[in-house]
Amino acid sequence: MAEKKESVMAGFKAFLMRGNVIDLAVAVVIGAAFTNIVNSVVKGVINPLVGAFGTKDLESYQSCLKGPCRIDDAGNAVSGIPIMWGTVLSAVLSFLITAAVVYFLMVLPMAKVLARRAAHDKAKEGVQETMEISELEVLKEIRDHLVAQRGPVPGTGSGPGTGSAGGSGAHPTS
């Protein structure tokens, strides 16, 4: 039982020490901080700008579904059913701004870097194949040249040094 517990703990430790888990944790922390910044920009800049063009702050826009809506000082509905579409629109704007910044500042540049790296690796692979082929061709040429310089290989039945009169190395017995 102790061995299984150790192996489970060792596996858990290996899981935590993988680069992916640490990268993910860093991404979540940075994403949360970035979301706070975007929400502040939407609430502090965009909502008042919409309010400058409209009659009130963006989050204050609402419609009443049933009956006249009355809201107390704390912001709670006393009567009627209010639909807070300004708050929803504010959240949608926050999401769109966050998505746009993530896409244009992180995803798009990373995709370009990965495409360049893939093209570079592909070109490098092509050069490597060409080098291997050319090395093979050079080695074949060297082999052919050495064979031509040396002459035919003895024992193949052609060239000088072959045949019965010439020096096969065998001595006739009489």
Image (cartoon, grey):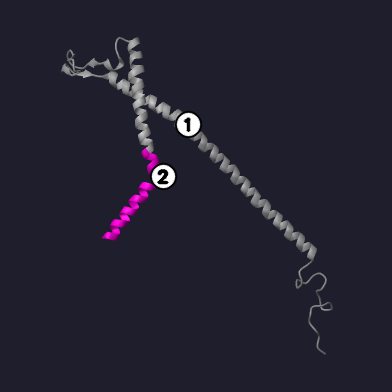
Q: Residue at (34%, 10%) from the top-left corner?
A: 52
| Quarter-of-image position of residue 20 | top left
Q: CA distance from mark 1 to mark 2?
A: 22 Å
Measured as percent of width and height from the top left, residue 39 is found at 34, 24
User: Residue 111: x and y, percent?
Assistant: 49, 35
Tell me where the magenta segment starts and ends, as one range: 1-25
| Location of residue 58 by image quarter | top left
Secondary element at image label 1: helix
Above or below, comparing residue 151 to residue 56 in the picture: below
Q: Which residue is at 37% across, 43% downward?
A: 21
Using residue 3 as the reference point, say whether residue 149 is left or right of it.
right
Is residue 34 shown above or below 82?
A: below
Q: Nearer the viewer, residue 133 or 110?
A: 110
Label 2: which residue? 19
The single residue placed furthest to the left in the displayed view is: 78
What residue do we see at 65% from left, 48% from top?
A: 130
